[in-house]
Image (cartoon, coloured by chain):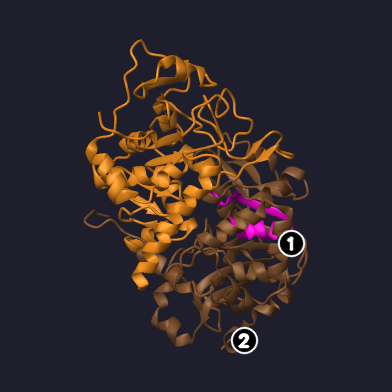
Amino acid sequence: MSSSRTNGKVVALESLGDIVRDGESVAFGGGWFANHPMAAVRQLIRAGRRDIHAITVVGSVDMDLMAAAGTLGHLSFSMVTLEAFGLAPNVRGGIESGSLPFTEYTGLGLLIGLEAQGRGMPYLPYRGPFGSDIPGRYPDIYATTTCPFTGEELTAVRALQPDVAIVHALRADAEGNAQWDGTSGPDVEMAKAAKRVIVTCEEVVDRQVIVDNAHMTKLPGYYVDAVIEAPFGAHPTSHVPRYAMDAWELMGYAAAAGDPAAIAEYVAQISGETEEGYRTRVLKGRDSVLSALVDAAEVIEGAQA
Amino acid sequence: MTDYEIHELMTCRVAAEVDNDGVTVMGSFTPLAYASYMLAKLTHAQDAYLVGFDAVGMAPVQLSFTGAEASAYKGAACRWGMLTEINSIHLANHGGVEAVSSAQFDGSGAINLSAIGPFDAPKVRLPGGAGAAEVIKMYRKMIAYFGNHNPRTLVDKVQFVTGTRWKVGDRAREEAGLQPGPIVVVTNLAVLVKDDDDRPFRIESVHPGVDVRTVVDNTGFELQVPADVPVTAEPTQEQLDLLRNRIDPFGTVKFDFVSGRERLSYLKEILDAEWDRAAARLA
């Protein structure tokens, strides 16, 4: 039995600041308003991490909050938006003022760069974003290559290896076997590409629970270095089927985010409380409704899939 | 004449482009596009194959801000992640209809979702294109929709090309290994179509009460104006009933057409209604 199986990987959220170091590149899982590892984001802020090179495919409040807290030294992304709640004001402000260096990927290019790394390839070719101005901006990431068989011109995207990937799963065991029921977004690709992988999850379970639901294991434990139990760990983004996004907290965030004094207070509050304290303060017994929102979402009856 | 609002006409016109061929993927919750796909699936394109939030083969769902993801999952045949999805749909030429909106759009079919002003020090940093840079090229049909048809959005040349159609004409697309199909622009004034690399967009139709001159004056790129420009079909009563009662009872599509101070209160009203419905299930 390998050491990865005998040594439990379960650690407390509070140790995250020791696992992730200033200046490292960190891929954050989730996408849209789904499944961002928000408990980990909050903990990195509490730990005072600085100069983090964040990598996100479709980021939202996770990236904006870290931009506001001064956690980020660089941002690689294909999209960051608060959707109905507006543009992400702190990411936007950081880029417009020049204080937040950034790399804008095309969405598929970023995923394929992660895929290349996960497959042990230095790059992968694909039918890329022909005509886009983005590749020309980043000759160290995008190049043109030719198919050796047909002569077709293709886009080559360089392998991307984050120092760390942090993803939020439904459950994991002490070996790091991690399961998702709802969306897994870019999580698996990020984990396969990164040097170290941290899984936060709604609950840590016995191996037997994982075995009983083995079809839901999307990330086997040999990839994983640390497992952290973090209930409501994606809040205020969603973790289907457990809870929907907390649109009310997001609305509050968006209102604060565009105001320097208000966002400083928002960040100070998170920095000064534990994750448990955060849950108590923000959920205020609303957790049952956030769960009921998942059940309330309707498929239109009588119509065919 | 049936009483309807402009976002309903636009939804119906986008829905008309959705057919039973290929796979249509939804990412971010963009209500008008979502409503169009659901409407098509409940009417003329019941075999349209939908994917939302990596939930593949999803059933038509009722729109809501908090429930879009959960409802997509509930009726889906399969749950993937992003990489499987892009390799299996977008890059494998299975994509049917892609509907996008952007801050700027030009007469070549290019979109700008990146920056207004210099890319490195922008006046306005936009959200970024996610997969649009690749996807609008790969899909059989590209639909671009704009709730406010004006020359600041429909420009002669976008300031930054986040993505393009790359090849427009059917033959050029097929030679490049892409599915043939047009670019269709649906705005609050008109429908514009481009299906040839060397010819400009032409006005396909103007909406009821809109004259051709208004469309030309509000478009920053060259338009081909046919001698006779038809009027866009109005929504039918059946379509309006489906949209208002079954697909979008909370009114999420209209949210993108509400501006200024009313926008936030409109959003709050929808969210309150969503909350009340969920809370009632607990009671």
* Quadrant (top left/top right/bottom left/bottom right) for the N terminus of chain B: top left
Please state the horizontal and vertical placement of residue A57, each as a whole percent of the image. 58, 54
Q: Nearer the viewer, residue B94 or B254?
A: B254
Q: Amino acid at mark 2?
A: Ser
Q: Colour of chain A?
A: brown
Q: Residue shown at 43%/36% (left/top)?
A: B178
The colour applied to the residues of chain B in this rendering is orange
Magenta range is A60-83
Position of A119 compared to A288: left or right?
A: right
**How far apart, in angstroms, are the residues tagged by discs 2 and 1?**
33 Å
Answer whether residue B272 is magenta in the image: no
Task: Say if A292 sits above or below A148 in the image.
Answer: below
Regarding residue A234, the answer to whether it shows in the image is yes
Q: Of A12 and A172, which appears nearest the observer?
A: A12
The residue carrying mark 1 is A71
Residue B93 point in image, percent of width and height: 40, 43
Q: Which residue is mark 2?
A: A3
Is A65 covered by the magenta stretch?
Answer: yes
Q: Which mark is residue A54?
A: none
Looking at the image, residue A227 lies above or below residue B236: below
